[in-house]
Image (cartoon, rainbow, N blue to C red):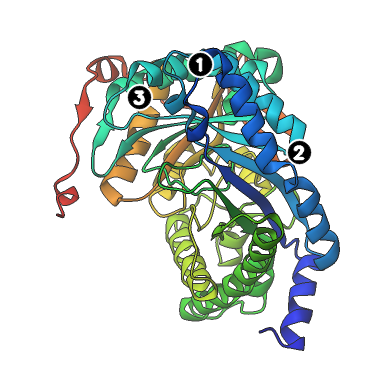
């Protein structure tokens, strides 16, 4: 139960510190759509989504009005589409998903996905090769591919293919700064209940449907830390924990209410600190509040490790069902502080990679020169997948090789996706490394049975 003081604190968080529920995401299983003629699959998928999610947006808007809590996005995640693609046309399936998402009015739909961490089926490969055309010809469909796990190792054939796919996706949307790549994530150790885009999908271990909520509040955490300037890190960690607890309770309230009204089981609360390009809503500024002159300088990785751990500790005390990615996101284009640090040259690709060892996800919304070779992109993916595999955590790469642009330029997507300066990559070749293919074996500590 909340007392009057806590209610007032929450109201201040919403009014002054940009606390919001970033998304209500309804996960929907499409496995029941598989039986039947292939030609009818696209209509069955459309009907299943519309029937299940027709009240999602109105319900989210009603909760927003009644509780006074901003709910920024309403989204859908579906069964990884490659599992439906045997004999089907992946592009047609992607367009059916896009039509269904628009019919119910959600912001994004995730799940044009394949899980290929050990090997690829023909259906997996067909879907992956269809990603560029699908993302270029749909509006709200998002895609993800899992190329590695701690248990299986890293599928380097899939890593090589994803470098080529990302290059083609950028080329097909060259007039939009390679926007298709902003809707595409390459994972290691992907989770099945992530409510955030572009990497959300409804895992095969999930039920027919679930309500997952992503709650955010970088501005709230920064405001709390402003009250303990000069205090030791023990106090900093405790302050973040207490703040994360309050943020998560808001998400739990919204999730349970949406679950009750929609008649769909409550899944998880993802308490990730998801920034926006708006001033006062930045993870980078939290790190700087701890005493760094600018994010990316020495000490940044340690500060981020403290933040990520304290957020998780506070969240798990507030809800028995914390899941998804839960921690601190560091998407460059979506965080005004990250943008500023990248423009100064302090935040480099190498430093971002080091930070991903201790944050929630990985290299996120990073723009690189458009002439970057596919094998360099694959090598970046391999590095990030290795961090995830060895450290038994989720890592990801969402990278945009911006066509026709180079260091000194920027890409502009607008809205929550923001804008990003082009960050340099190493020009030395990784071609022979990526050409080997095969599989990087799982680490010895994966043998736990």
Question: Which secondary structure, mark 3?
Answer: helix
* Residue at image coords 48%, 56%: 300
Distance Cα–Cα, label 3 vs label 2:
30 Å
Asked whether the viewer can see residue 178, the reply is no
From the top left corner, tell me how far across and down residue 363 is, in percent.
48, 39
Left-right relation of 383 to 266: left
Distance Cα–Cα, label 3 vs label 1:
33 Å
Left-right relation of 261 to 195: right
Mark 3 or 1, closer to the camera: 1
From the top left corner, tell me how far across and down residue 339 is, in percent.
64, 42
From the top left corner, tell me how far across and down residue 250 is, in percent.
67, 68
The residue that label 3 is drawn on is 159
Q: Is residue 166 above or below residue 242?
A: above
Marks 3 & 2, CB-CB < 8 Å contact = no
Q: Which mark is residue 415?
A: 2
Q: Residue 229's image quarter?
A: bottom right
Give neighbour class at mark 1: few <14, some 14-19, many 20+ (Cα, 10 Å): few
Q: Is residue 77 above or below residue 87?
A: below
The residue that label 1 is drawn on is 37
């Amino acid at each position: 139960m909340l007392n009057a003081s806590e209610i007032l604190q929450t109201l201040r968080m919403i009014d002054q510190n940009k606390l919001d529920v970033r998304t209500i995401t309804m996960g929907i299983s499409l496995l029941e759509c598989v039986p039947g003629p292939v030609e009818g699959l696209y209509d069955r998928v459309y009907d299943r989504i519309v029937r299940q999610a027709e009240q999602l947006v109105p319900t989210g808007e009603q909760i927003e009005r009644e509780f006074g809590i901003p709910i920024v996005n309403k989204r859908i995640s579906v069964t990884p589409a490659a599992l439906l693609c045997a004999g089907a046309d992946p592009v047609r399936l992607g367009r059916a998903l896009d039509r269904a998402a628009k019919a119910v009015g959600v912001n994004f739909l995730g799940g044009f996905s394949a899980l290929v961490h050990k090997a690829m089926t023909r259906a997996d490969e067909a879907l992956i090769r269809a990603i560029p055309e699908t993302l270029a010809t749909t509006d709200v469909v998002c895609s993800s591919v899992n190329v590695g796990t701690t248990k299986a190792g890293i599928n380097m054939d899939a890593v090589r293919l994803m470098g080529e796919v990302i290059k083609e996706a950028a080329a097909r949307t060259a007039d939009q700064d390679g926007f298709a790549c902003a809707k595409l994530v390459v994972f290691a150790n992907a989770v099945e209940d992530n409510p955030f885009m572009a990497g959300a999908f409804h895992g095969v271990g999930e039920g027919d449907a679930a309500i997952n909520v992503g709650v955010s509040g970088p501005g709230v955490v920064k405001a709390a830390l402003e009250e303990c300037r000069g205090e030791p890190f023990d106090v900093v960690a405790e302050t973040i924990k207490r703040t994360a607890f309050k943020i998560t309770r808001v998400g739990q309230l919204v999730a349970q209410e949406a679950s009750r009204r929609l008649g769909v089981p409550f899944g998880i609360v993802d308490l990730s600190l998801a920034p926006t390009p708006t001033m006062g809503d930045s993870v980078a500024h939290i790190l700087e509040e701890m005493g760094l002159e600018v994010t990316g300088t020495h000490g940044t990785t340690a500060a981020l490790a403290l933040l990520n751990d304290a957020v998780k500790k506070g969240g798990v005390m507030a809800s028995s069902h914390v899941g998804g990615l839960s921690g601190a996101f560091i998407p460059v284009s979506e965080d005004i502080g990250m943008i500023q640090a990248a423009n100064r040259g302090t935040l480099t690709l190498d430093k971002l990679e080091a930070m991903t060892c201790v944050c929630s996800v990985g290299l996120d919304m990073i723009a690189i020169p458009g002439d970057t070779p596919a094998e360099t992109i694959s090598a970046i993916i391999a590095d990030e997948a290795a961090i995830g595999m060895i450290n038994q955590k989720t890592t990801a790469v969402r990278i945009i090789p911006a066509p026709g642009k180079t260091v000194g330029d920027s890409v502009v997507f607008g809205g929550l996706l923001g804008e990003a300066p082009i960050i340099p990559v190493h020009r030395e070749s990784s071609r022979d490394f990526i050409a080997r293919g095969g599989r990087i074996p799982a680490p010895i500590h994966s043998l736990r049975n």
